[in-house]
Amino acid sequence: MDEALIVANPCEADGNPPPSFRVIAVTSGKGGVGKTNVVLNLALALARSGQRVLVFDADLGLGNVDVLLGIVPRYTLSDVLAGERRLREIMIQGPEGIMILPAGSAEWDLTALSPEQQVLIQEELERLSPSIDVLLIDTGAGISSNVLFFAAASQEIVVVAAPEPTSMADAYALMKVLAQRHRETRFRLLVNMAKTRREALEVYRRLLLVSGRFLNISIDYAGMIPADDYLPMAVQRQQAVLTAFPHAPSSAAFRRLAEVVLEWEPARHLKGGVQFFWNRLVTQA
């Protein structure tokens, strides 16, 4: 990307407010921490707040956003990358008006996108950007090239961690790799499946402590989602917990999380790497 594009943002130069749309990657250092559940319920909570939400299942080759909702997509991202469909043609409508870009499952050729495929996805998302307010990217887990690409290309990186040692270690490893390879310096931490608020804050404290010693990054606390029996019950029903059990403690937590997300300041400038919607960020006044 041209360095001039990174520093010259007319939204700042002429005093106009920055664009209000948000591109948020929800990621994790390891699987099994409920990341996709977080994405779906956050999407619903944001939609109920009047946001036009697009969920991009970017766990390529192992996508399961559609599975959690009991939806069988006719086309997936593999059809787009094969040149047979456009992103707008594979979009499916989820509950309460959210839109979903399905990744498909068991697609081994998608596990590591080529640079040409990354550009194609970026261009296709750029065409969709005028019709959405929030793009939620459900990345895979770990530090694969796809995970790093989608996280680095987003304005906000939400790292989901559970209150257990391997999850915390892997969350730290993910942030370390993104900091070292992609110069990411700011992360949001969401603690999922916590028994208490104190337990969630302890996860945050530990990650702050170790990152303060070894990494030059900031970690903001995005909140916590409590462990309750309603979440697995909703999964069995192939529904979001917000829909199936709106009065569950986890549902209340997702509503609070949406409020927190909407309070985040929209990005006022581009990060150092390539970002989704970079052209719109630069040209919109």
Image (tube, rainbow, N blue to C red):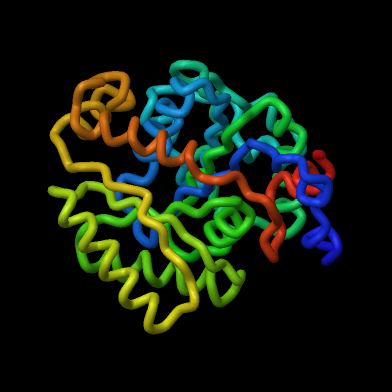
Q: Residue at x 21, y 58 (%)?
A: 163
Q: Which residue is drawn at 63% across and 40% down?
A: 78
Residue 112: percent from left, percent from top = 60, 59
Q: Residue at x 46, y 67 (%)?
A: 218
Q: In which quarter of the image is residue 230?
A: top left
Residue 44: percent from left, percent from top = 42, 26
The tally of labels here is 0
Question: In the image shown, does 152 or 201 lie closer to the viewer?
Answer: 201
62 relative position to 51: left or right: left
Question: In the image shown, does 255 or 234 lie closer to the viewer?
Answer: 255
Q: Residue placed farthest to the bottom in the image?
A: 213
Q: Is residue 184 above or below residue 256?
A: below
Residue 85 appears in the picture as rendered: no
Q: Quadrant of residue 103?
A: top right
Residue 152: percent from left, percent from top = 60, 59
Q: Residue placed farthest to the top in the image?
A: 96
Q: Residue placed farthest to the front in the image?
A: 15
Quarter of the rendering occupied by the N terminus:
bottom right
Residue 23 appears in the picture as rendered: yes
Residue 32: percent from left, percent from top = 29, 51
Q: Is residue 91 above or below residue 122?
A: above
